Image (cartoon, helix red, strand yellow):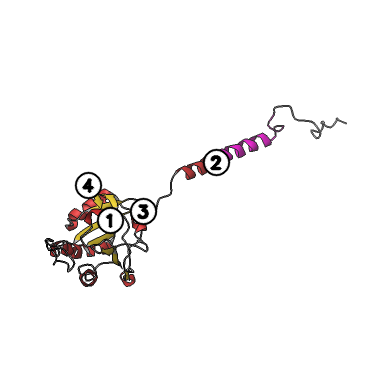
Amino acid sequence: MAASPPSDQGTPAPAGSAAGRSPRPLLAALLAVAAVLGATAVLRDRSTPAAKPAPAAVPAASATVRVYPAGRTAPALRLRTLDGRRLDLAALRGRPVVVNFWASWCAPCVQEVPVLRHAASAYRELPLLRQASAGHQGQRLAVVGVLVNDRPAAGRAFMRRYGGSWPVGIDPDGQAAARWGIAGGLPQTVFVRADGTLASQKLGELTRADLDRQLVGILR
């Protein structure tokens, strides 16, 4: 009777062969690579500032008017303008001021440009205030804009396209708007008396009727 071939069971595989290699070193290497990639992604996320969302346009149904208590001084407003000059509200003391907060992508901001043009041209010279000195030659209404969280190039293109001629300060991070209590969307318009105190604030698109009503509080 022929001898049966020897069985492979129980015979150790040669050292270095595929059958004898443990998968654990390979698994450990893959885990190490994954950990490095994960740490890199976390560091990248921490080093890259999150984009600040732009404020939304105010729906027409949400347009409201806020009236300020008497004697509240307007916050400081010092910004670089679209044409490279300086906008300083303090330099306008003695004149009533309309401060319009807007952005180039805002559809209601487009609609209210003719109203602001009217304000800038129709009220260049105002009647003398009762308490003004005899030498006072008249009081001009000032219209200024504040471009909020928007690109200066877009703001300049907007002003050229729609015929805006008033100075516009650049508020790239929205900090100036926040100091003025501008929240809930754009546009918003603040009416400032000649003595530098706040009169009212219009949330939403400014209409001609809105303008006439709010000017009553700062042109007297």
In the image, farthest residue toward the front: 134
Across and down, in percent, residue 146 comes to 27, 56
Residue placed under numbered mark 1 in the picture: 146
Residue 24 is inside the magenta segment: yes
Residue stretch in magenta: 17-38
Could you tell me which residue is drawn at 25 percent across and 64 percent down?
A: 193
Residue placed under numbered mark 2 in the picture: 39
Residue placed under numbered mark 4 in the picture: 85
Mark 3 or mark 2, which has the lower sequence index? Answer: 2
Residue placed under numbered mark 3 in the picture: 175
In the image, farthest residue toward the top: 15
Question: In this picture, is 108 found above or below 175?
Answer: below
Mark 1 or mark 3, which has the lower sequence index? Answer: 1
Instruction: Rate crowding at label 4 as few (under 14), some (14 to 19) or many (20 or more) other CA atoms within 10 Å.
Output: few
- Quarter of the picture containing the C terminus is bottom left
Question: In this picture, is 112 found above or below 9?
Answer: below
